Image (spheres, rainbow, N blue to C red):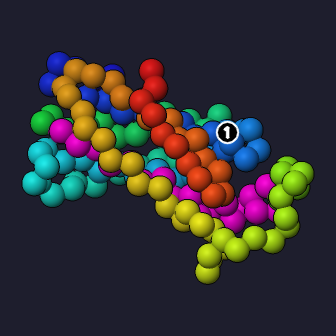
Amino acid sequence: MSTDTTASVSTHILDTSIGRPAEGVTITLAARAGSAAEWVALGGSATDADGRCKDLPALPEGTTHVRLDFLTESYFLSKKDKQAEAQQDAPAHRDSGAAGVFFPEVAITFAVVPGEHYHVPLLLNPFGYSVYRGS
């Protein structure tokens, strides 16, 4: 929960290729106080069965920018066979890059103001993603 001097952040991930929450994606959180400041790693967590990450670290006072790093490679590698089965028209083998995953990581950076809550959902599939400020 945020106070008048800090912002707060939450997120969840929906794997749109299978229409289900993305469970087990590691997420790290970093913050900085100003555009010229260095990023400070605050820690992280992983998504639960509902694709939610409910225990991200609190932001320090003075935070103006936040970066969420979604480590998607291990998630996609663990789901590779299941996703091919779920996508009826998808070929079993695709050119996904050297590691077999096109987006091994998704980094989202956004500005925050004190006292506000920022829910930043990630809509994810093997070849694209989108984010937005939720509620």
Residue 132: within the magenta? no
Q: Quadrant of the N terminus?
A: top left
Q: Is residue 72 visible?
A: yes
Q: Residue at x 15, y 25 (%)?
A: 5
The percent coordinates of residue 33 (x first, y second) are 13, 44
User: Mark 1 highlights which residue?
Assistant: 21
Crowd rating for badge 1 (residues with CA inside 10 Å; few <14, some 14–19, many 20+): some
Left/right placement of residue 66 relative to residue 73 reads left
Residue 113 versus residue 128 in the image, above or below: above
Query: In which image quadrant can residue 9 be found?
Result: top left
The percent coordinates of residue 90 (x first, y second) are 83, 58
Residue 79: within the magenta? yes
Query: Given the current orientation, which residue lies at the most extreme front position?
Result: 89
Label 1 element class = strand
Query: In which image quadrant can residue 8 be found?
Result: top left
Residue 83 versus residue 53 in the image, above or below: below
- Residue type, numbered disc 1: Pro
Q: Which residues are magenta?
A: 63-83
Q: Is residue 48 visible?
A: no
Q: Residue at x 60, y 66 (%)?
A: 102
Total marks shown come to 1
Left/right placement of residue 71 relative to residue 44 reads right
Q: Looking at the image, which is closer to me, 74 or 14?
A: 14
Q: Looking at the image, which is closer to me, 30 or 18?
A: 18
The percent coordinates of residue 92 (x first, y second) are 85, 67
Q: Residue at x 66, y 57 (%)?
A: 126
Residue 44 versus residue 105 in the image, above or below: above
Q: Residue at x 76, y 44 (%)?
A: 18
